[in-house]
Image (cartoon, rainbow, N blue to C red):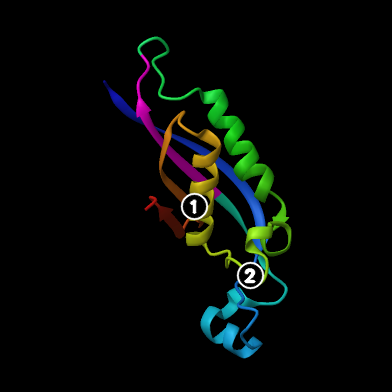
Amino acid sequence: MARAQLVRQVNFAAAHRYRRPEWSDARNIEVFGACAHPHFHGHTYVCDVTVEGEIDDTTGMIVDLGLLDRVLASEVHQRFDHRNINLDVPEFADGKLIPTGENLARFIFGRVQAALGTAAQVVEVRLAEDRTLASIYRGG
């Protein structure tokens, strides 16, 4: 069977900061620099999700694009857009995941794969905070 990959992009604007609650403010600033600022900072994220699967002979597609779009809307855009990730996304609350690009890419990978089930395999999530910085998570 012929296999292919499909890349779909979703954008969202969100605020966050890096902070370990068990550390002092000084230690957080020492490790995370300006990213630990107590007033948060924001990005317009660009998230590319790559899925892979067999090309269906009838549709010529590896996944129903409508399904993929619905999953990305609920698991990425609606979850993160115009949110404070530290305050509005429970998995990234104080004492849980630090909302680094790496952790966000890994989290999105897992959420999208769980929502797609067996419809397609997520093989990569690339999350860019701006033109100069992106994180890539490939699973594992």
How far apart marks 1 and 2 lie (CA) works out to 16 Å
Q: Picture coordinates of residue 131 (x, y %)?
A: 48, 55
Of the numbered discs 1 and 2, the one sitting upstream in the chain is: 2
Residue at image position (68%, 43%) is 78
* Residue 105, placed above or below residue 112: below
Identified by mark 1, the residue type is Leu
| Residue 12 located left or right of residue 127 | right
Q: Which residue is mark 1?
A: 127
Q: Which mark is residue 17?
A: 2
Q: How busy is the neighbourhood of tag 2: few (under 14 within 10 Å), some, or many (20 plus)? A: many
Residue 35 quadrant: bottom right
Quick one: 68 or 82, which is closer to the camera? 68
What is the magenta range? 46-56
Residue depicted at 58% across the width and 38% down the height: 72
Tag 2: residue type?
Answer: Arg
Query: Is residue 53 in the magenta section?
Result: yes
Q: Is residue 23 above or below residue 130?
A: below
Is 123 on the left or on the right of 36, as rendered? Answer: left
Instruction: Please provide percent x and percent y for residue 68.
Output: 53, 30
Q: Secondary structure at mark 2?
A: loop
Question: Viewer-proximal residue, 80 or 45?
Answer: 80
Q: Measured from the top left, where is residue 73 in percent x and y?
A: 63, 37
Name the chief secondary structure element in magenta. strand
